Image (spheres, rainbow, N blue to C red):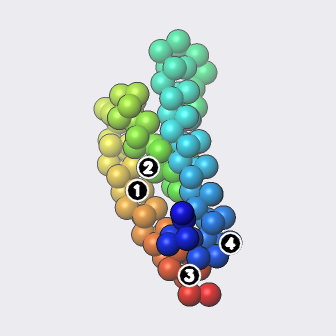
């Protein structure tokens, strides 16, 4: 089924990495929202931005919208979409290079 997308093991590992980091990012935003509502210890903004930078921007943006979280913070409303573009370009570059070699 994935044969048209995945041409070697390295691409499969890369796809798995980006899938996991985006799921984690989504759940970090969910957990931070829950903790904010309960006035508990929070996940730091730097941690949320770091996981987004490391490939989790799609999960972060989805979490922001689904949980209506961090939508009033410019560093997130501007930063996460920028990181999303960066993530997609990085993924395209990595997948293309792994396809060739």
Nearest to the eye among marks 1 and 4: give it.
4
* Quadrant of residue 1 within the rendered picture: bottom right
51 with respect to 68 (left or right):
right
In front: mark 3 or mark 2?
3
Q: Give the spatial CA distance, label 4 vs label 2.
A: 23 Å
How many residues crowd around disc 1 within 10 Å: few (fewer than 14), some, or many (20 or more)? Answer: many
The span from disc 3 to disc 2 (Cα, nearest Å) is 23 Å
For the image, the number of numbered tags is 4
| Closest to the observer, 9 or 72 | 9
Q: Which mark is residue 25?
A: none
The label on residue 58 is 2
* Mark 4 or 2: the one toward you: 4
CB-based contact (under 8 Å), mark 1 and mark 4? no
Residue 50 appears in view: no
Label pair 1/2, CB-CB below 8 angstroms: yes
Question: Which mark is drawn over residue 9?
Answer: 4
For label 3, the SS is helix
CA distance separating discs 3 and 4: 10 Å
Q: Residue at x 51, y 38 (%)?
A: 26
Q: Earlier in the sequence, mark 3 or mark 1?
A: 1
Residue 84 got which mark? 1
Percent coordinates x, y for residue 25 in the rendering? 54, 42
């Amino acid at each position: 089924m994935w044969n048209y997308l995945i041409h070697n093991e390295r691409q499969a590992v890369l796809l798995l990495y980006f899938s996991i980091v985006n799921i984690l990012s989504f759940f970090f935003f969910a957990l931070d929202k829950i903790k904010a509502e309960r006035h508990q210890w929070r996940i730091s903004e730097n941690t949320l931005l770091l996981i987004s930078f490391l490939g989790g921007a799609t999960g972060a943006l989805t979490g922001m919208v689904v949980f209506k979280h961090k939508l009033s913070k410019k560093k997130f409303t501007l930063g996460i979409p920028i990181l999303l573009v960066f993530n997609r370009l990085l993924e395209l570059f990595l997948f293309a290079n792994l396809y060739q070699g």
